[in-house]
């Protein structure tokens, strides 16, 4: 076999590319595992809270709003890589920042129901793996309703989150 510098360079490049692809596959698999055990599907897949998650819209945004007294109603967003209705324009670093700091790329805060405080404890490798997985799922075109301010009309099924000590009977309607 003739081992020319060009031949060796091509072999090295091929091995490097294969190694990078393998690392990416491991990140995506780790991210899928973390998204699964983290329950991301619960709040971000339509039908989940009705016992029939729509697998065709996996992570494509909920059909249920969460009312937080004094703050409004929030619907689980589309976290697929769809560029129009999801997080398709977000970089891996922006996804990691959002899940670990509660800050979106545009500077707005994530809804208070998002457990970013817990995700802030992830290792950088695990947070990056979640981002890699989210960027790898099938994009879903599904626009969910924007947050609703207190007192505004709600167009989705609603879960009401009550402050400690408040009962459903005492909650404002």
Image (cartoon, rainbow, N blue to C red):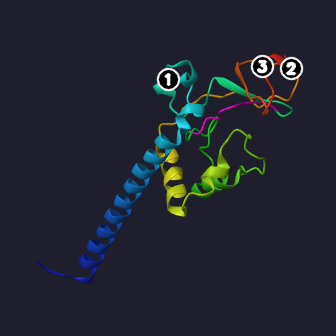
Toward the viewer: 8 or 48?
A: 48
Q: Give the alpha-carbon distance from disc 1 to disc 2, as whole Å.
A: 32 Å
Closer to viewer: mark 1 or mark 2: 2
Using the image, tell me which numbered label, if any, was put on residue 172.
2
Residue 105, position in %: x, y?
71, 52
Label 3 SS: helix
The part of the image, by quadrant, that contains residue 96 is bottom right
Magenta segment range? 72-79
> Residue at left 52%, top 43%?
38
Residue 145 can be seen, yes or no: no
> Residue at left 50%, top 61%?
125
Label 1 SS: loop
Residue 86, position in %: x, y?
62, 38
Residue on which the image places disc 3: 168
The mark nearer the N terminus, 1 or 3, is 1
Q: Give the alpha-carbon distance from disc 3 to disc 2, as whole Å.
A: 8 Å
Using the image, tell me which numbered label, if any, was put on residue 54.
1
The part of the image, by quadrant, that contains residue 60 is top right
Badge 2 density bin: few <14, some 14–19, many ≥20, Cα 10 Å: few
């Amino acid at each position: 076999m003739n081992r020319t510098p060009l031949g060796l360079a091509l072999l090295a490049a091929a091995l490097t590319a294969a190694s990078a692809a393998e690392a990416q596959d491991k990140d995506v698999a780790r991210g899928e595992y973390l998204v699964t055990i983290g329950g991301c599907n619960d709040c971000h897949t339509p039908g989940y809270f009705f016992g029939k998650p729509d697998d065709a819209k996996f992570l494509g945004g909920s059909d249920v709003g969460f009312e937080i007294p004094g703050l409004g109603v929030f619907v689980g967003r589309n976290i697929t890589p769809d560029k129009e209705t999801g997080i398709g324009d977000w970089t891996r670093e922006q996804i990691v920042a959002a899940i670990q700091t509660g800050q979106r790329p545009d500077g707005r805060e994530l809804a208070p129901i998002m457990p970013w405080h817990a995700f802030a404890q992830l290792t950088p490798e695990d947070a990056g793996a979640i981002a890699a997985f989210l960027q790898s799922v099938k994009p879903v075109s599904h626009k969910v309703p924007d947050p609703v301010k207190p007192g505004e009309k709600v167009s989705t099924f609603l879960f009401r989150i009550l402050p400690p000590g408040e009962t459903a009977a005492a909650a404002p309607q």
